[in-house]
Image (cartoon, helix red, strand yellow):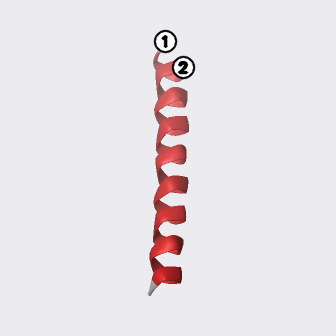
């Protein structure tokens, strides 16, 4: 259970980082 939760947290962190990078790229493209 604990390992599964840690895996979910790591995955959500990766998604959050990817989202931040994606939004930055979008802003650069728009500008």
Q: Which residue is outermost to the top?
A: 31
The answer to which of 11 and 28 lies nearer the viewer is 11
* Residue 29 at x, y percent in the picture: 53, 22
* Residue 27 at x, y percent in the picture: 47, 22
Residue 20 vs 16, above or below: the answer is above
How far apart, in angstroms, are the residues tagged by discs 1 and 2? 5 Å
Q: Residue at x 47, y 81 (%)?
A: 2
Q: Quadrant of the N terminus?
A: bottom left
* Residue 24 at x, y percent in the picture: 52, 27
Q: Which residue is outermost to the front?
A: 2
Q: Residue at x 54, y 63 (%)?
A: 10
Q: Residue at x 51, y 72 (%)?
A: 6
Residue 31 vs 7, above or below: the answer is above
The answer to which of 28 and 2 lies nearer the viewer is 2
The answer to which of 29 and 3 lies nearer the viewer is 3
**Label 1 environment density (alpha carbons within 10 Å; few <14, some 14–19, many ≥20):** few
* Residue 3 at x, y percent in the picture: 53, 81
Label at residue 28: 2
Q: Are marks 1 and 2 in contact (CB under 8 Å)?
A: yes
Label at residue 15: none
Q: Residue at x 54, y 46 (%)?
A: 18
Numbered marks: total: 2
**Label 2 environment density (alpha carbons within 10 Å; few <14, some 14–19, many ≥20):** few
Callout 1 secondary element? loop
Label at residue 31: 1
Callout 2 secondary element? helix
Residue 17 vs 26, above or below: the answer is below
Residue 14 is drawn in which quadrant?
bottom right
Q: Which residue is outermost to the bottom?
A: 1
């Amino acid at each position: 259970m604990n390992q599964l939760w840690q895996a979910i947290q790591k995955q959500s962190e990766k998604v959050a980082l990817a989202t931040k990078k994606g939004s930055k790229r979008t802003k650069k493209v728009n500008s």
